[in-house]
Image (cartoon, grey):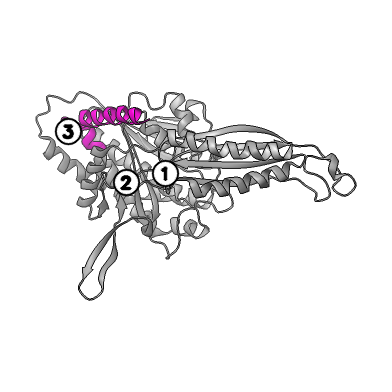
Amino acid sequence: MQDMFSTTAQDHQGSMVSPSYITKNVTEMIYSTIERHDTEPRSINSQIHKNPELSYEEFLAHDNIVSLLQSLNFRVTPHAYGLSTAFEAEYGFNAEYDALPDIGHACGHNLIAMSSIAAFIGLASALKASNVPGRVRLLGTPAEEYGGGKCKLIEAGAYRDVDACLMVHPTTGMAIGKSSTTTCESCGCIPTVTKYGGQAYTNFLAYDQFNAHFAGRPAHAALAPFQGLNALDAVVLAYNGVSMLRQQTRPTDRLHSVILDGGTMPNAITASATTQYYVRSTTSSEVNALKDRVVACLEGAALATGTTLTIEHLNKYADMRPNKTICTLYTDAMRELGSRVLHEPDTAEAGLGSTDQGNVSYEVPAFHGVFAIPCPDGVFNHMPDFTACAGTNEAYEAAVVCAKGIAVVGWRILTEDGIAEKVRREFEEDVRKKGMDG
């Protein structure tokens, strides 16, 4: 599960204090508030990391965060928008907190939750102390890994009337870097990689998740195998077909599958078998085209084995559409905090992961920055060793810096003349262009 926060600007004309003066003083207020409340996010971070809960099962995380926010006198709606492990607090930020099966928080969603909570507390306190009109919302978003929690929240209207939606996500430092070439007279060109503490403009792939069920006919594998139709054979044939398909796909396309059910006994012809597929590409339209090719492989396997294929649609995530203005604001805020953040939207390569924040980015101006936490060489997200990395004090401190950064971004969107309008205008143009591109 994740937490995210969103902001809604209100009319603040007539202020006698210049935006730059307000920002300078409020920035210090945001920093000090987050530092003063360090105990609360740190406790939540530890509780979530030590008690990993899967998609839509994040009951302990939900209850602990709700209790914390209520203790700070925020108005909180538990079980929000019809989802038992979602919540909403007013005064958004997205707060993810779901874990992965078997390996816990190997994607660091504990850090996403605590950074959004800290940013929410800091920004809400600044609004109250400065008597500035506006609204900031912390939204607890379950089931990012498997269940498409934000997609359900979109359908329930959770993102209506929102000016911006912000969150940050941990990764390893090796996943953030810019390749360049250094010329050397003696040995020619040497490739180098410049490392950064984070990345503002992040592309994520669109993806489609579905189950393929093959139904055959049972038979005794020794006495009468000729009477059976082997569903496991269909799964294996489909798997091999999709594996061969990879040779003719784009470098940014990704195809993954796992066998969920392959039968129970070797001496029985498998009558029912199921495999799950992820299809990823740079846009939703490209995912649709690639999925058609995958399904053709599955249909061919069913035809060859005499089995019946049924497709069960699960989740569909859109590609991420980062708002460039928000990315620039975040880069500036992190620079003030002494953190070097990569922000090159015109040359950013397509990311190889996917997130339901991509769906949010088609509804409202959105931000999904990433930040580096200390990890041994060769360790990346969704690896067991990353779970330990996400639970370190160094990872927590890195997330706190990001919390300060996104809180400052939220303040600027809410209060500085023209920024919210620029963010919205850019968002509308980007979505329009994306629609034309298909």
Residue 217 placement (x, y as % from top left): 80, 37
Q: Which element is circle 3 on?
A: loop
Taking the view exactly as shown, the residue that stands out farthest to the right is 223
Q: Amino acid at mark 1?
A: Ala
Q: Crowding near pointer 3: few (<14 within 10 Å), some, many (20+)?
A: some
Residue 221 placement (x, y as % from top left): 84, 47
The numbered mark, 2 or 1, whose residue comes first in the sequence reads 1
Q: Amino acid at mark 3?
A: Glu
Q: Which mark is residue 416?
A: 3
Q: Is residue 202 visible?
A: yes
Q: Which element is circle 1 on?
A: helix
Q: Is residue 126 visible?
A: no
Look at the image and give the residue range highlighted in magenta.
410-438
Q: Which mark is residue 377?
A: none
Q: Which mark is residue 113?
A: 1
- Mark 2 = which residue? 403
